[in-house]
Image (cartoon, helix red, strand yellow):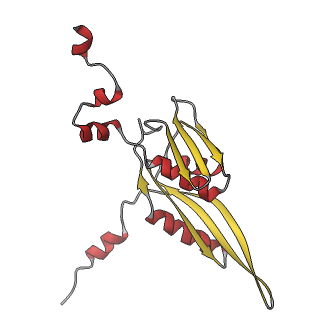
Amino acid sequence: MARNNDRSAESTVRDEPELIEKLVGINRVAKVVKGGRRFGFAALVVVGDGRGKSGFGTGKAKEVPEAIRKATEDAKRNMVRIPLRDGRTLHHDVKGTYGAGHVLLRSAPSGTGIIAGGPMRAVFESLGVQDVVAKSIGTSNPHNMIKATFAGLLYIQAPRAVASKRGIKVADVLGKKSQLETTS
């Protein structure tokens, strides 16, 4: 009744891509008790593969490393795929909102770089976006900025997906005239 343990060896050695982890912020909170103050920590982490997949997570614990570990695990569970144009920028401009946080995300030409502040920069770096212009309007709270950024990113659709839903050609979605229309 010998078992083949090759399967367990294969499951431990996976071709999982290297994830980019960005620590956005750590908050220290104090609870006042009879003997003094008890401190706790809350961490906000963004995780991505650098190829269009990213997520964020939060974690709370009595120690900073444990809070970061919990936030990282939460971020890995909440990863979403975002379609990118040429693997470097967004397909179209989009607005995202979460609470009092409003963000404006704009695609940019090659060579522009990431023009975004603080928490949004961490999202774009982990996502693999190389050229983008972003503006935060409203709150500067990192939690709300990141949630608003992801709310905006989830609205982005690739032209191929839009064309397949509508049953038309990709060129028609992009507004390009076909060769037959221009010659006649």
Image quarter of residue 103: top right
For the residue pair 10 and 125, the one nearer the viewer reads as 125
Between 23 and 92, the one lying in front of the other is: 92
Q: Is residue 126 visible?
A: no
Give the residue at the far top of this rendering: 184
115 horizontally vs 75: left or right: right
Which residue is found at the position 30% from the left and 19% from the top?
Answer: 177
Residue 178 lies in what quarter of the image? top left
Residue 120, position as x, y percentages in the image:
59, 48
Asked if residue 149 is positioned above or below residue 26 in the image, the reply reads above
Q: In the figure, is residue 181 to the left or right of 152?
A: left
Q: Does 129 appear above or below 177?
A: below
Q: Residue at x 52, y 43 (%)?
A: 95
Identify the residue at horizontal 36%, vertical 39% (top origin).
158
Position of residue 117 measured from the top left corner of the image (x, y, whole percent): 65, 45
Q: Residue at x 57, y 54 (%)?
A: 146
19 or 63, which is in the foreground? 63
The quarter of the rendered structure image containing the C terminus is: top left
The residue lying toward the viewer, choosing from 86 and 141, is 141
Q: Is residue 7 above or below residue 111?
A: below
Instruction: Give the position of the N terminus as an image quadrant.
Output: bottom left
113 in relation to 8, above or below: above
Report x, y in % for residue 90: 46, 38
